């Protein structure tokens, strides 16, 4: 084991130990993102921001960009969907209500790309197996929390402060399923559509995991909580655990998703867009 790998393992052990010291061993509360400790909440937010700033698509373009643009690109990767979804139903985006997200995103961007000496060391540390897996765990839980927040804000957006329906009363469907589906989908992968010059290209990459999981997990959550009576926090926990497994084990994940992605063929829908070489996206 190299010194960098040893340092990465020590960091992971230290984070786990500090979480246990702050809140005890509570895996269910962790998956539900029910953190009573401000330290655990802040660490989770920073971990999520560091993960998104360090992702390959972001790292590929940000270092060469003018710094304000690079910082915005990191923000898009971190909570682009968290902005789009609430704005769709005329609600304030969560990062503007909880400014911790904005400042930690800026901090993570600077540490990842521009802090002298530290950025180089962090890149080496983040490439180690223990740190990669730790960031994936934090990302899976936090992104699920963000996605479900977008679903619930879409449902709440239909009701005003007095409990009355905003706008005209629906004739047939009183629960805003379409709004929840759109906002949940954007909450899970909305950053894929930003900047807006990308258009709808992310939808053409139908075999992209974030796009696929965002759609099917939103459907699952709506059906489980609105139709089957599953407790919201339990449904959130199952969804976070599923995303966590998918992030940690991409090989088996694709084996499971392959037959699901073929279901559109049964209703004669066209395949995902092909690239310039005529190949389907992986």
Image: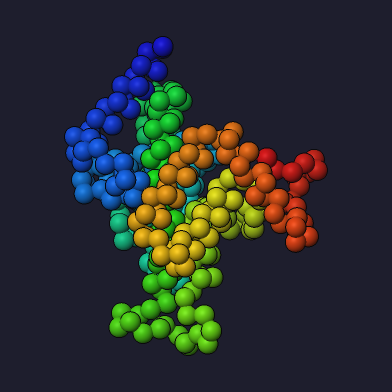
Question: Residue 93's image quarter?
Answer: bottom left
Q: How is the image coloured?
A: rainbow
Count of marks overlaid on the render: 0
Res 197 visible: yes
For the N terminus, the image quarter is top left
Q: In this view, does 12 lie to the left or right of 112?
A: left
Residue 105 at x, y percent in the picture? 37, 45
Pick whichever, 10 or 249, lies toward us: 249
Foreground of the two, 150 or 62 = 150
Residue sitting nearer the eye, 218 or 179: 218
Q: Position of residue 198 (x, y in %)?
A: 62, 54
Visible residue check, residue 85: no
Q: Where is residue 53 in the image (x, y as percent from the top left)?
A: 45, 40
Q: Quadrant of the C terminus?
A: top right
255 on left or right of 226: right
Q: Is residue 74 left or right of residue 215?
A: left
Q: Which image quadrant for residue 136?
A: top left
Residue positioned most to the front:
228
> Going by the picture, which residue comes out furthest to the right?
278
Residue found 74% across the figure and 43% down from its top: 280
Query: What residue do we see at 64% from left, 58% from top?
Result: 200
Q: Residue at x 69, y 54 (%)?
A: 263
- State the residue at coordinates (45%, 41%): 244
The location of residue 279, given as percent across then percent down, is 77, 41
User: Is 134 placed above or below 78 here?
Assistant: above
């Amino acid at each position: 084991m190299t010194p960098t790998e040893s340092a990465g393992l020590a960091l992971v052990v230290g984070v786990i130990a500090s979480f246990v010291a702050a809140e005890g061993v509570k895996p269910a509360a962790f998956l539900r993102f029910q953190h009573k400790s401000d330290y655990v909440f802040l660490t989770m937010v920073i971990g999520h921001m560091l993960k998104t700033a360090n992702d390959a698509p972001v790292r590929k373009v940000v270092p060469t960009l003018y710094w304000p643009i690079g910082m915005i690109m990191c923000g898009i990767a971190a909570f682009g969907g968290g902005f789009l979804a609430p704005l769709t139903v005329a609600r304030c985006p969560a990062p503007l209500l909880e400014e911790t997200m904005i400042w930690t995103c800026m901090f993570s961007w600077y540490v990842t790309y521009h802090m002298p000496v530290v950025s180089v060391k962090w890149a080496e540390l983040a490439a180690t197996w223990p740190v990669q897996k730790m960031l994936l765990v934090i990302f899976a839980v936090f992104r699920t929390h963000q996605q479900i927040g977008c679903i619930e804000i879409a449902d709440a957006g239909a009701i005003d402060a007095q409990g009355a329906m905003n706008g005209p009363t629906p004739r047939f469907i009183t629960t805003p399923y379409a709004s929840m589906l759109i906002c949940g989908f954007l909450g899970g992968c909305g950053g894929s559509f930003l900047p807006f010059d990308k258009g709808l290209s992310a939808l053409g990459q139908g075999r992209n995991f974030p796009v696929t999981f965002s759609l099917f997990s939103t459907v699952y959550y709506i059906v489980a909580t609105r139709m089957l009576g599953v407790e919201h926090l339990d449904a959130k926990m199952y969804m976070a655990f599923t995303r966590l497994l998918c992030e940690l084990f991409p090989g088996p994940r694709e084996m499971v998703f392959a037959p699901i992605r073929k279901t559109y063929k049964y209703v004669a829908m066209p395949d995902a867009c092909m690239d310039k070489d005529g190949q389907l996206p992986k």
